[in-house]
Amino acid sequence: MDRRLRGGFLAIVVLGAAFSTQAEGQGTLVAATAADPQHFNPGITTASHTHAVADSLFNGLVALGRSAEAVPDLAQSWTVEDAGKVYRFKLASGVRWHDGQRLTADDVVFTFKEILLKHHARTKASLSPVVEDIVAPDDATVVFRLKRPYPALLQQLDVTEAPILPKHLYAGSDPNTNPVNLKPVGSGPFVLESYVRDDRINLVKNRDYFKPGLPAFDRIVFRVIPDERTAVLALVKGEIDFLREISVSDISLLRREGIVLDRVTSGAGGGNCIMTLGFNLERKPLADMRVRRAIALAIDRDRIERDVIFGLGRVADAPISSGIGFAHAYGLLAGFTRNIGAASQLLDDAGLKVGQGGIRFKIDIAHFPQFSRYSDAMRQDLAEVGIQLLPRQLDRAAMIDAVFMKREFDTTLIHYCNGLDPEIGVRRMYVSSNIAKVPFSNAAAYRNAEVDRLFDEAAAAAEPAARGRIYRTIQEILVQDLPYWWLVETDFVAAHRSTFEGFQSWRGQFAEQARAKP
């Protein structure tokens, strides 16, 4: 039984911890990752396994604290001017790329204009409509000029949402195919030493890091261990020190072994996640609202919460995660209790009568292999109303190609992480400008001009209460249109050995607070 839970990702940014393991030597942290990162360019993807490694190689302008407040990273200070339409950042001094070149404001401007605003699904969707220009008046200053006030900007400038990349290595190239993606040159606390695909990634301490005394670890080793049970046993034996996600079934074992468990619900970029069924609105019969509503009424989400994620989360009750309290429309999906009779009637009304073998029609569902328990549960549910669901398990490259590049799918299953603000991880799913060949963008190809307008209005509103009212209106429209069906909000549990402490579980990252136990 596959009980893996896919929540937000954990970027391993170990800055202040120090401890040793017998397996790999003094000053080494060994972490398991369930999949190979495939490349190390976090600016062109929101994929968890890429960021889990690459976010230790790069920096953002800011980092995020416990309350999602911005704290210095590459930017040592900033000011907000012109009633919130201008943000001026002063860069830290002495920052160098791993190849010795100076990092300057030109790198920041280039990264945003040529990479992030074109290739990073969340950043492209949220910042492209609001940014008027980004300029570098001098080597140490970056100025964002916005078309309107935009309160969510600072929360989108950390290493997960906006990693800064070296202009001198990416200028004039396609960032998707640049060979530097496999030989990364960052500014972060660690440097790539070696990479053996599907085996391990070795990072070593950046001894010229611009933050004094950091990092404390000499080395991080990422071991690629696809089988969760193997990874858990390696943690128990002391062969690895950290697992970013474990299943509910392993909690008791790890507690008995003295392993420290952290339940994580939110965090930068990868937090506040909703497992979501996406409909291809460009295909029949899914273009018919009655069919989408019938599917929603036929799926037993309570069973998914109970038998698929084993209570580590909750049934979704709105299109925006409950982890974003000011924007979440509590109880909006309360009327969607499973109702086979109502679902069947909607399908009859749509002219989709029961045929041979009790089947009305067949549709496929494209998803990653680790989501098979979800599709199995939905296949059983939909069979009761005469819909034959055909799972297509695809690896990451094939999934992106089928869903976002070629749009060759009927339905898809995506773990959309909402982040800390709807501008970060929600907008990208719904605005028509983000129907693009960009991974994890608007998979449904949903178009609604009023929704587009309301997202812009909400982004510009200064007060959370005012923004919340607009987001509720957006969610009411989404529930009427049903471009997606929101299944369950997922939490996840990270596990680490008890020889150190101070993890920032709210960020899903190790950071300055991580340290050896005295």
Image (tube, helix red, strand yellow):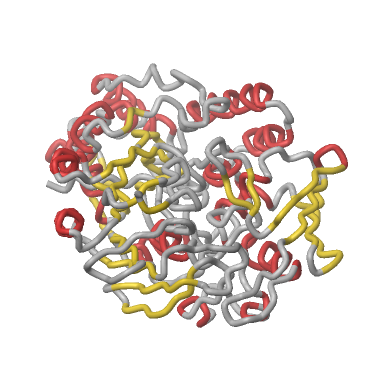
Identity of the residue drawn at 58% across and 29% down? 474
Residue 46 horizontal/vertical position (percent): 48, 57
Identity of the residue drawn at 57% across and 54% down? 161
Picture quadrant where residue 377 is located: top left
417 lies left or right of 226: right
Identity of the residue drawn at 15% across and 36% down? 358
Residue 456 appears in the rendering: yes
Picture quadrant where residue 331 is located: top left
Who is closer to the viewer here, 437 or 142?
142
Question: Is residue 39 shown above or below 14?
Answer: below
Residue 411 appears in the rendering: no
Who is closer to the viewer here, 350 or 393?
393
Q: Farthest residue in the front direction?
A: 518
Residue 112 horizontal/vertical position (percent): 68, 62
257 lies left or right of 284: left
Q: How many marks?
A: 0
Identity of the residue drawn at 36% across and 62% down? 396
Picture quadrant where residue 224 is located: bottom left
Question: Is residue 316 shown above or below 113?
Answer: above
87 lies left or right of 305: right
Residue 94 horizontal/vertical position (percent): 69, 70
Residue 413 horizontal/vertical position (percent): 35, 47
104 lies left or right of 398: right
Who is closer to the viewer here, 215 or 128?
215
Question: Is residue 145 shown above or below 74?
Answer: above
